[in-house]
Amino acid sequence: MRVEVVSGAGNAGSVDLADDTFAVDYNEALVHQVVSAYMAGSRRGNKSRKSRAEVRGGGAKPWRQKGLGRARAGSIRSPIWRGGGAAFAAKPRSFDQKVNRKMYRGAMRSIVSELIRRERLLVVDDFTVENPKTREMVARLAQFDLKNVLIVTAGRDETLNRAARNLHSVAVQCFSEVSPVSLLSFDKVVMTVEAAKQIEARFR
């Protein structure tokens, strides 16, 4: 498929992108499954509480079994006692969900294709700033009338990263760092021609 390439001054021509990467049908179920798995995998899952066996103390029976008229108790670290252990103590766990490589690639193709159909993906010839200054990034975005945007580059651009890091609605990622969640989290996605070619080669 042929996609228009824009610059700050207007149309800068067009670029041919593979139909099997940028023009596939939208598979909502697959995208939902992959995005859910990606977000679940980002959960820390490291909370930990002590069970009655791990709380210090409680080795001796607090009083004899019979004859005192009180409820039976075997330990002062029982979950029903103040200072006791948790009844069902949470332990570190992994929330990872298995996603096959074929599924992941299919979801990414589906997402970028839908972004193009909805005119949310903008292919540019180049996107750089001379100095790592926030005002320069704001001025550069104003050329394209962009505010909430993900910028995808072919390689790491430290100057661009530093210029955008104070803008909470702007993110800069290398093509290898792009994820389903990052593509769907912004109103617009700006992608350089070279980055689009890299994504085409990676997910086709």
Image (cartoon, grey):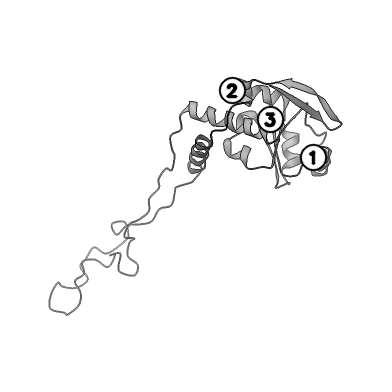
Q: Secondary structure at mark 3?
A: loop
At horizontal 62% and vertical 40% (from top left) the residue drawn is 184
Q: Is residue 181 above or below residue 90?
A: above
> Where is residue 156 drawn, in percent x and y?
68, 30
Q: Amino acid at mark 3?
A: Arg
Give 88 or 143, whichever is nearer the viewer.
Answer: 143
**Marks 1 and 3, how far apart in space?**
19 Å
Q: Is 201 placed left or right of 189 in the picture?
A: left
Q: Is 34 placed left or right of 170 in the picture?
A: left
User: Which residue was labeled with disc 2?
Assistant: 202
- Say which mark, if any, is on residue 184: none
Crowd around label 2: few <14 · some 14–19 · many ≥20 (10 Å): few
Quarter of the image with the N terminus is top right
Q: Amino acid at mark 1?
A: Leu
Quarter where residue 164 is shown: top right
User: Which residue was labeled with disc 1?
Assistant: 141
- Say which mark, if any, is on residue 156: 3
Give 184 or 61, whichever is nearer the viewer.
Answer: 184
Q: Is residue 90 above or below residue 193?
A: below
At horizontal 61% and vertical 24% (from top left) the residue drawn is 21
